[in-house]
Amino acid sequence: MKNKIVRFIGGSVLAAVAVTGCGWMSSQSPMQSHSMHSSMMDNKESATSAADLRVGLNSLLGEHVLIAAVATSHALGGRDAAFKGAVGGLDANSVDISKAIGSVYGPDAEKAFLPLWRKHIGFFVDYTTGVAIKDKAKQDKAVVDLVSYSEDFAAFLSSANPNLPKSAVTELVKGHILTLKAVVDAQAASDWPKAYGAIRSAYGHMHMIGDPLAGAIAKQFPQKFSGAVDSPAANLRNTLNLALREHAILAAMATGSALGGRTAEFNAAAGAVDANSIDIAKAIGSVYGADAEKAFLPLWRKHIGFVVDYTTGLAAKDQMKQDKAVADLIRYADDFGAFLSSANPNLPKSAVSDLVKGHILTLKDVVDAQAAKEWPNVYSNLRLATSHMAMIADPLGMAIAKQFPEKYAQR
């Protein structure tokens, strides 16, 4: 078993990481043309704004952590095909991050960035392999390589942008390494509550890289990125995007473990989904008060229950149960649209309902692919479902800022 794990972690995975040109650009999704999203975002805060830059970088960096955590879980569990699918999704994310860098610094920087970024993924492959076979020397070497990498990565960013001190970037990258290492260690120990707590911590840490990177770029190119990167409106939009995107991926982790019969992992994943739900409710409460927070949380949880029903029906090949769950989810979209519309006149009920239906359908595609074990489709669908969450978060953030301009200034 150990030899099998080593073979597919150390061989096929490194080959997959080396593949180029497989990126899927979320910004090219046809969903981005939705009328509500377009109209709400057509303002001075959004068009090539510092807020766009911040949300975009944080979204990609957060996605990197979550898909990496799925990949290491599959690797340590010996699920070869699922692991290769996750690695494909992870590398597509890497390509997108490099394109984001290239959009600012040009094609030469993009070409230099991509192999440098992939390098630390290779070192994590080494570490995961060492953990799988209980090779302490291999683990220690991988950690040394990762710490050394943090210096190289910081030097790259610092050379491109004088607003990014090398020492500060180095420490932030070391933080990324240590938080993701904690995920792998907990997964290897099958300590799933600890693993999902570590996953959420690692995800939360990535904005500590994305925020200063966006701020430094906006400062370097003020003519290219309008508005403040840290305005109250930008802060709200960033918070909503990160929380809703995390919801999509954690939900997929839960359904994947449920369909795979990994009960202990599913229970921990479900706990993480609910912790994320509480965070989203608190974000709503920070705007509309404690009563709204209390009303929002059970309503939000309700659609998660329907997704569980659909997943259960799929696992049991019970078409009636699946159909009922889909019908319940579609009705839920109307209820959710009514809730937000009643709280904010800038959110038309029908438009919100359509966006929530989009969330439901894109997540359904993920679950269907998981059940069919179509692993490349799982991760392309997952990236689409995650990207779609911006189409809820962005209009919601803009509508709140419009409703409370004194609190959420767009400076």
Image (spheres, rainbow, N blue to C red):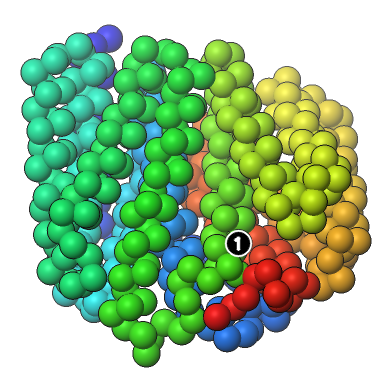
Tell me the quarter of the picture where residue 70 sits: top left
Q: Quick one: 319 or 274, which is closer to the camera?
A: 274
Write down the residue under mark 1. Answer: 236
Q: Is residue 235 left or right of residue 110?
A: right
Q: Label 1's element?
A: helix
Q: Can residue 229 be seen at all in this image of the molecule?
A: yes
Could you tell me which residue is drawn at 59 percent across and 63 percent down?
A: 237
Could you tell me which residue is drawn at 34 percent across and 62 percent down?
A: 212
Q: Is residue 206 left or right of residue 238?
A: left
Q: Is residue 401 left or right of residue 375?
A: right
Could you tell me which residue is drawn at 83 percent across and 48 percent down?
A: 292
| Residue 266 drawn above or below residue 376 | above
Q: Can residue 395 be seen at all in this image of the molecule?
A: no
Please provide percent x and percent y for residue 265: 53, 19
Q: Amino acid at mark 1?
A: Leu
Please provide percent x and percent y for residue 176: 30, 42
Please provide percent x and percent y for residue 179: 33, 34
Where is the C terminus found, in terms of image quarters?
bottom right
Could you tell me which residue is drawn at 62 percent across and 25 percent down?
A: 271
Q: Quick one: 143 or 295, which is closer to the camera?
A: 295
| Residue 63 drawn above or below residue 111 | above
The residue lying furthest to the bottom in this view is 223
Where is the N terminus found, in terms of image quarters?
top left
Tell me the quarter of the picture where residue 187 sits: top left
